[in-house]
Image: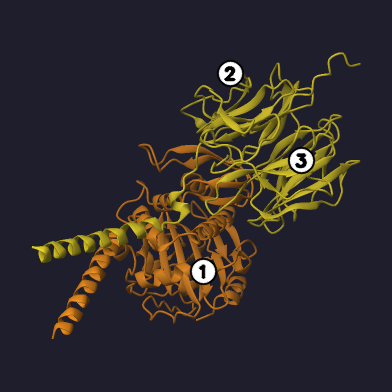
Chain colours: A yellow, B orange
Amino acid sequence: MIRRLNVLLLLMAMVGFGIGVNRYIAQQKSTVVTQKASKPTETRAKFVLPGTIFVAQQGQIYALHAGNFTRLPLPKLGDWMQPYVLPDGSLLTVAHQPSYSDLYHISADGKVLAQLTHNHVSDKTIQLNHWVYWPSATADGLTVFASHDRPKPALNASYEIDFSIWSGPLAGNVVATRQTTPDPYTGGDIQPAPLPGGGLLYVTYSMSADSHAVAQLAFQATPRSNTVVLTSPEDGCSSAAVAPDGSTIAMVCTADTQTAKLKIAHLVGGKLDTPTVLVDSCLCSAPVWAPDGSGLLYLAPSDATGHFQMWWVKNAGLPTAAPPKQVTRDVDLDANSAPTWYLPAPSPAPGGS
Amino acid sequence: MRLRRRIGLGLLIVFGFVLSGGIGAGSYYFSTALVALKITGQKVGSIAAPSPNPNGGRTATPAPATPPPAPDQPFTILLLGSDNDAKFSGGSLLTQSMILARVDPVSRKVTMLSIPRDLYVPLYSGGTDKIDKAYAYGGADSAIATVEMDFGVHIDHYAWIGLQGLTNLIDKVDGVDVIASNPVLDDYYPADMSGSNPYDFERVCVLPGAQHMTGAQALQYVRSRHGDLRGDFGRSFRQQQVLLALRAKAKALTYADIPDVAAAIQSDFKTDVGITDVGSLMPLAGNISLDNVTQVVLLPPFTRGQMIGAQDVLMPNWDLILPEVHKYFPAT
C-alpha cells in the first residue's frame, strides 16, 4: 500500500515537474512582448514637479499635478494629442481622425470651449480634407500658430501635399494667414514657435543633394519676412523649444541617423550660436522648458520596450545642468506630443507693494 | 543485487523526470514547431531558364539551390515584402520591397541594398519588366534568379513577408522605435488592409521625429510614397529604418518568445532558412551595431526615370550599378 502511494506521489511529482518546466519557459518571455504600457492614471510620477503638466497617450490628454495623473474627460472627437497651454491655463489641442484633424480650444478640466478649425470636408472624397498639427500661441495667447496642409493642388492634379505654417487670432480664424512657403514634396514646414518680439521659429524640411530628407531650424524676424535657416542640413535639427528668456533654444538633432542628440543653443541677433549637447545618443523627442526656466522636460524611452517616458533636466542650459531624471514610469506617452506646462505666476504677497 | 536494483530504480526516476520535463518543454514549443516547419526551410527549386536569354549578353548564373555557407562565413539574404491583399490572388504577388542584405558573422557587418521596385530589368522568367514582377512570375525562385542574373551576385537565402505579417510582427514585439525622417503625407495611400474595396484610398499623415510606432503606423511609414519627392527611393530609406528598428527590438527577444512571434506571422512569412539556422541567427542579429550597417539605395545617376508604355519605370545604369554593388556583394 505504502509502495503504491510512493509510486503515485512520484508520478505526480513528475507531472508537476513537467508543468513547472512548461511554465518556467513561459516566464522567460522578453519584457518587450509581455510588458504593456500602463495608463498614466494607473501610475504615479517618481517625483513631484510644480504646477500642472499636460501630456498625451493613446488619444487621451492627461494632467500631471502633484505627482498624480488625471485624464481630461474630453468628448470623443478623435484621438486627442499635442496639448499647448495658453497663458490663462486653457489649452489648444488637436483631435486626430483617420482622414483629418482639427484644432480645439479646451479648458484645463477638459471642456471643449471652441472648435478652431473645420477640416472635415468629405467622407467620400477624402482628399478634400485637411490636417492641422503643432498648435502654439504668442505670449499673450491671442494669436495662434499651427502647421496646416493648405493649399493643396486641385483634386487629382498632383500628389503634392505639404505643411505650411499658418496663424490667426484665437478669437477668429486661426489658420487665416499663411506664414511660410514649403519646399514641395518634402513634408513642409512644421512646429511653429512664436518668439517674444514677433519673431517665428519653425522647422523646415528639404531634400539634400543625396536625396535625404533633412530638417533645419528656420527663423523669421517678423511675420512673413525673409526666412533665415539657423542650422545645417547635416545636423538634422527639429523640435525647437524656446525658453522663457526668449533666446535659449532646446532642439533635437538626428544628423540623418536613428539616434538623436538633445542640444541647447542661443538665438542672438538672428543667429544661433554653437550648440552644446545636453543628452547624447538618445531617442529624445518633444522638449519643453519649465515656465520659470528652471529646467527642461523631454520624452524618451527608458528601456527595451521603447515606451516613451518623461525626463527632467534641472538647470538645462546652465553649466550646473543636472543629469536627466526619469519623471514617469511604465507609461507610453505620445512622442509626437510635447508636454506642456502650466505654472501660475505667484500671486503678490498680501499687503506687499 | 539490491544495489543494482536501487541504481536501476534511481535511473528510472531520473528518466521519468527528464521525460516529463521534455514533454513540458515540448508542449510549449509544439505549436511553434508546426508553424516553424511550415514557414522555414522552404525549398528554392529550379525554374526553367529563359529562352532566349533576356540578359542582353551578360552571363545568367541563377543558382537557387546551393549548399548553405559555413556558420562563420558571410552570407546573403534577399528580403522580399509584398502587397498580399485582396487585389492579388493565387500567390501572384508583386514585391513592393526588395532588399539584398549581406551579413558577415565574424566582422558583424551588414550591408543592405534596396532594389527599386520599378527597376526595369530582364526577368529570369523571360522578357523585360519591372523587377517587382519577378516574384509574381515564379515566386521566390524567380525573384532570386532575377537578382542573381541582373546584379551578378550570389544569394544564399531569402525571406518573404506580406503586409499583414509585417504589421502583426511589429505589434507582437509591441511596436518599433523609429526616428521618422520627415512628415509623410499621402492623400492616395492604398486602403487595402481594411474595408471592402481594396482599390480605395485613405489619407495618411505620419509625423516626424522619434516615436514608438505600432504595426499599422510603421506600415504607413514604409509604404507611403506619393507625397515624397523621392517617390520609391524615399520609401526605400524608410524601409531600411524600420528594418533596423525591428532588429533592435529582436535583440530583446528570448527563445520563449518564439511561439508568439511565429503565431503572429505564420500565414504571411516564408523563408528557406532552416529552423536550426533561425535559432543561430537570433544572437547574431542582436550583436550587430548600427555603426556596422551600410545602407545602399540606387538613386540617380545609378537609375533614371522613364516612361515605357503607360508605366513609370527606372532604367538601370548597369555601368555604375554593378561596380557599386560588387563593392559590397562579391561578383559571381
In this view of the protein, can residue B126 be seen by the observer? Answer: no
- Which residue is disc 1 drawn over? B101
**What is the CA distance from the residue labelled 3 to the residue labelled 1?**
44 Å
- Which residue is disc 2 drawn over? A111
Which numbered tag is attached to residue A295?
3
- Tell which residue pokes out farthest to the left in this image: A1
Q: Amino acid at mark 3?
A: Gly
- Crowding near pointer 3: few (<14 within 10 Å), some, many (20+)? some
Q: Amino acid at mark 2?
A: Lys
**What is the CA distance from the residue labelled 2 to the residue labelled 1?**
53 Å
Q: Nearest to the eye among marks 2 and 1: give it.
A: 2
Q: Position of residue B7 (x, y in %)?
A: 20, 81
Residue sitting nearer the eye, A5 or B39: A5
Quarter the N terminus of chain B occupies? bottom left
Look at the numbered disc 1 and give the secondary structure of its residue. Answer: strand
Q: Say which residue appears at 61% left-offset and 38% top-offset.
A: A45
Q: Position of residue B326 (x, y in %)?
A: 57, 76
**What is the CA distance from the residue labelled 3 to the residue labelled 2?**
30 Å
Q: Position of residue B34 (x, y in %)?
A: 27, 62
